[in-house]
């Protein structure tokens, strides 16, 4: 079978009782000593996996190949399982595969085999990528568990702590953990101290999932390693510390923010991963309803005032503001941002990172920026009265200001500004609009199924009884890590400050009254936007309830 063959072949292999599975999953001894699996960790290719088959490495990693098949066995037989569908197991093959090998694969995965012809180079590259990370992580954890140097290290001197943090297994574990988190599209890595040692977790699509955890005796060494990378004081374990470092993964460069806090069982660490090569998402790709998108475009096109993105941490506020800034004409306007941290690099925009250790806070940076003759400003967050006051003054003196607030909904942004000691008349005079948002997970497109949800949940999300309608959810598959969801999309609530709302804000009307007026003036509640996306089979009622039940 040539590698240029365009059609896939589906072969249903009959079970064979005389096949020795354990024996056949190992390559002959002579080939095993010569094949590339002995140097897998050092030979990970950076180019796309099996481009001719249009498949991603994520599919390969979900089949747990290292648990059932040696890499040398696959390489010798020139086959590589790629993914399971509802009806077949897709297998990449180079040349004519041995029928007994295909039979083995069919028995292991319980499906007929569908062949995907590829070249020898593509196959070898795929096997290396499938096995390198898994084998390396297993080996590193075993090395940490077997290492006598880590036993009883809690009372060691500082020099010994530094030495332990530089041990090869510790260095490899931290590096591989960051790589696996990035490959899994994680935004954060959590290393949580517990009675049994460190618990490692990744936050993927806003939800935490367990990651490979190190043995208990390596806990202090791993925490010290992260603190060394972030240039923190590894001898200080009684107070919280914050730092950062930069790491390169193949062609990608990551900025990693580190936060440590002392807990009952030792220090817990959170690493925030920021991809320096990431690009802002287009405003029309965020998931706004057409009516909201059109209103928001009009608001951000105004020459002065304040536009606020509201929501909790991790709700996509900064991404939305970046998308809005991208629509401004940076050739005829001067745009300056003050951020903590700078998440994306924008062409034609002057971006200033906050540096509290050097005395560069939001307020001090904003004060200096106003002397730079800007047209458009973005303030990462209005978190204190001083920053809020300067931003309001900037808007009142002819600038357009973008910023964020941590509030549950759009009308609450007004009460939050009042809490920050901004006068009601200033709020009414400067705010163009408030966009509140959350991120909900998308239903995995590979495992969609119909189901009947809890009618009470449906009634709560939709705002009225709907009975038990047939909706869609993800069953869970290899592609979505059995979660049923893959990727995220925003749900939104836009409050446009009209004359009626202006008067209510100036009169210090209650939050309930502001919300009532907002709905009367056309504000669509976030939960309603979520219900629309449920009906469009983009997300689930349970997911909308998870992020809006406040």
Image (spheres, rainbow, N blue to C red):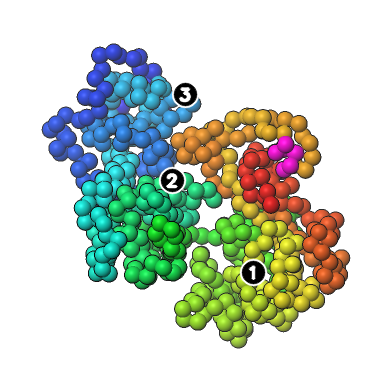
Return the x and y of residue 364 as percentages of the image width and height: 57, 82
Task: Say whether residue 116 is left or right of residue 286.
Answer: left
User: Cα distance, mark 2 to mark 1?
Assistant: 34 Å
Q: Secondary structure at mark 3?
A: loop
Q: Secondary structure at mark 1?
A: strand
Q: Secondary structure at mark 2?
A: strand
Binning the other alpha carbons within 10 Å of mark 2 as few (below 14), some (14 to 19) or many (20 upward) gives: few
| Residue receiving disc 1 | 403
Return the x and y of residue 429 as percentages of the image width and height: 79, 75
Residue with the most extreme left position: 30
Binning the other alpha carbons within 10 Å of mark 3 as few (below 14), some (14 to 19) or many (20 upward) gives: few
Q: Main secondary structure of the magenta part?
A: helix
| Residue receiving disc 2 | 210
Question: Splitting the image into 4 quarters, where does residue 498 fall?
Answer: bottom right
Query: Which portion, as a residue range, is magenta?
Result: 456-461
The residue at 31%/49% (across/down) is: 215
Task: Say whether residue 46 is left or right of residue 308.
Answer: left
Number of the front mark, 2 or 3? 2
The residue at 36%/22% (across/down) is: 106
């Amino acid at each position: 079978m040539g590698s240029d063959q365009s059609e896939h072949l589906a072969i249903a292999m009959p079970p064979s009782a005389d096949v020795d599975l354990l024996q056949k999953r190992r390559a002959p001894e002579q080939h095993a000593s010569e094949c590339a699996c002995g140097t897998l960790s050092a030979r990970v290719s950076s180019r796309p996996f099996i481009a001719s088959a249009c498949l991603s490495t994520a599919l390969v990693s979900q089949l747990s190949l290292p648990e059932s098949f040696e890499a040398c066995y696959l390489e010798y037989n020139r086959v590589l399982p790629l993914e399971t569908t509802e009806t077949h197991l897709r297998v990449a093959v180079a040349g004519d595969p041995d029928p007994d090998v295909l039979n083995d694969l069919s028995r292991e995965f319980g499906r007929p085999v569908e062949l995907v012809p590829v070249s020898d180079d593509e196959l070898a590259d795929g096997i290396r990528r499938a096995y390198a990370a898994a084998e390396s992580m297993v080996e590193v954890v075993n090395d940490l568990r077997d290492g006598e140097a880590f036993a009883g290290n809690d009372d060691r001197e500082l020099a010994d702590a530094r030495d332990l943090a530089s041990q090869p297994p510790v260095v490899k574990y931290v590096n591989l953990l960051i790589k696996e988190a990035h490959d899994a599209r994680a935004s954060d890595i959590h290393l949580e101290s517990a009675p049994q040692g460190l618990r490692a977790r990744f936050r993927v699509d806003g939800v935490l999932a367990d990651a490979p955890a190190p043995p208990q005796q390596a806990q202090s060494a791993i925490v010290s390693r992260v603190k060394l990378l972030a240039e923190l004081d590894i001898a200080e374990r009684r107070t919280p510390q914050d730092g950062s470092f930069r790491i390169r993964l193949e062609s990608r460069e990551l900025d990693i923010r580190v936060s440590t806090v002392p807990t009952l069982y030792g220090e817990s660490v959170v690493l925030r991963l920021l991809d320096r090569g990431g690009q802002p998402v287009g405003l029309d790709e965020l998931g706004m309803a057409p009516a909201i998108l059109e209103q928001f475009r009009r608001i951000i096109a105004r020459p002065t005032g304040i536009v606020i993105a509201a929501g909790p941490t991790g709700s996509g506020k900064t991404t939305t503001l970046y998308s809005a800034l991208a629509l401004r004409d940076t050739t005829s306007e001067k745009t300056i941002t003050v951020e903590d941290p700078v998440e994306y690099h924008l062409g034609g925009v002057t971006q200033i990172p906050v540096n509290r250790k050097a005395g560069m806070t939001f307020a001090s940076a904003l004060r200096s920026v106003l002397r730079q003759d800007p047209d458009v400003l973005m303030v990462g967050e209005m978190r204190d009265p001083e920053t809020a006051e300067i931003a309001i003054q900037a808007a009142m003196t002819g600038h357009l200001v973008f910023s964020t607030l941590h509030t549950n909904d759009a009308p609450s942004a007004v009460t939050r500004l009042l809490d920050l000691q901004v006068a009601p008349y200033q709020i009414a005079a400067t705010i163009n609009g408030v966009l509140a948002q959350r991120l909900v997970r998308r239903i995995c497109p590979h495992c969609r199924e119909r189901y009947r949800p809890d009618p009470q949940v449906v009634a709560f999300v939709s705002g009225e009884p709907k009975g038990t309608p047939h909706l869609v959810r993800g069953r869970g598959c290899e592609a979505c890590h059995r979660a049923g969801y893959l990727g995220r999309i925003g749900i939104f609530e836009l409050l446009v400050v009209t004359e009626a709302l202006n008067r209510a804000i100036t009169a210090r009307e209650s939050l309930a009254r502001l919300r009532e007026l907002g709905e009367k003036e056309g504000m669509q509640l976030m939960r309603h936007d979520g219900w629309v996306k449920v009906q469009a089979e983009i997300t689930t009622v349970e997911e909308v309830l998870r992020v809006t039940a406040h």
